[in-house]
Amino acid sequence: MISIRKWTYSAITIYRLNGFSGLVRAIWEKVNEYYYEIRFSIDTSGRIEIKDLNKSINSKVYAKYGILYAGSQFEWLRKAMASLPIEKKNATLLDLGSGKGRVLCYALQKGFKKVIGVEYSQELSKISVQNLEKLKEAKNIYFDWEIICDDASNYTIPSYVDVVWMFHPFTGPVLTKVLHNIKKAAEKKKLYVVFANPPKDEITSDYMALVKKIRADYPRVFLYEIV
């Protein structure tokens, strides 16, 4: 968890950049994080720079096009899950760039039939497995989940996936290839994408159509349907 010293510095910075309302929102999001982390018996907080994640991988592509780790805020997750026009009990969610597994844990709690996480970092993949196991033990019920440690751009999306989640996990040609893979997977069934901090419209418009701006201001969260 974040230290008091770091939080004080962050709070001052947020106040200077976003004013009092921005600070209140940041505090509310942090309270939500503590609540859900304790409730789910998991630890998905923190921030890890890409240079640190890449030490064990030593990939030039990952270093250039990968994005640091930071968990999606639980408030985004709550609103995003409520916006999905699907029956979650029969649906599978795929998180590309799944990090420590926060989205996967939350989706299982919200009734998804299955979740799949694809994460390039072995360090983050191991943590996500631990978190999913902790969730299973804490709730004492069966969860269907899968963690795949691989490059998301090389991953073939299963035909049974209904929702793809991405929190701006990569850029450049890696993102382009992932978007192409998502569009290909949607040729046989309807597929929704929840994209937190999506790129500019000219990058996404060839692959998906905007359904709803779940969160219009920064950090933005949009719901798309593959076209």
Image: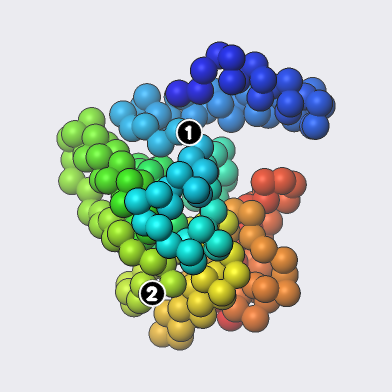
Q: Do the residues labelled 1 and 2 touch (CB within 8 Å)?
A: no
- CA–CA distance between discs 1 and 2? 27 Å
Numbered mark located on residue 46 in the image: 1
- Disc 1, SS: loop
- Disc 2, SS: helix
* Quadrant in which the N terminus is drawn: top left
Considering only vertical position in the picture, is 96 above or below 69? below
In the rendered view, does 87 fall on the left or right side of 19? left
Considering only vertical position in the picture, is 181 above or below 45? below
Q: Which of marks 1 and 2 is nearer the N terminus?
A: 1
- Mark 1 crowd level (few <14, some 14–19, many ≥20, 10 Å Cα): few
Numbered mark located on residue 154 in the image: 2
- Mark 2 crowd level (few <14, some 14–19, many ≥20, 10 Å Cα): few
Write down the quadrant of residue 27 in the picture: top right
Farthest-out residue, top: 4
Towards the viewer: 12 or 26: 12
Q: Residue at x 73, y 28 (%)?
A: 14
Q: Which residue is drawn at 25% across and 40% down?
A: 130
Decide if residue 113 is in sight here: no
Give the percent coordinates (x, y) of residue 150. 33, 64
In the rendered view, does 22 fall on the left or right side of 44? right
Q: What amino acid type is highlighted by mark number 2? A: Asn
In the rendered view, does 191 fall on the left or right side of 121? right
Give the percent coordinates (x, y) of residue 72. 52, 43
Considering only vertical position in the picture, is 225 above or below 59? below
Q: Residue at x 66, y 24 (%)?
A: 10
Give the percent coordinates (x, y) of residue 121. 37, 53
Q: What amino acid type is highlighted by mark number 1? A: Gly
Write down the quadrant of residue 161 in the picture: bottom left
Write down the quadrant of residue 200 in the picture: bottom right
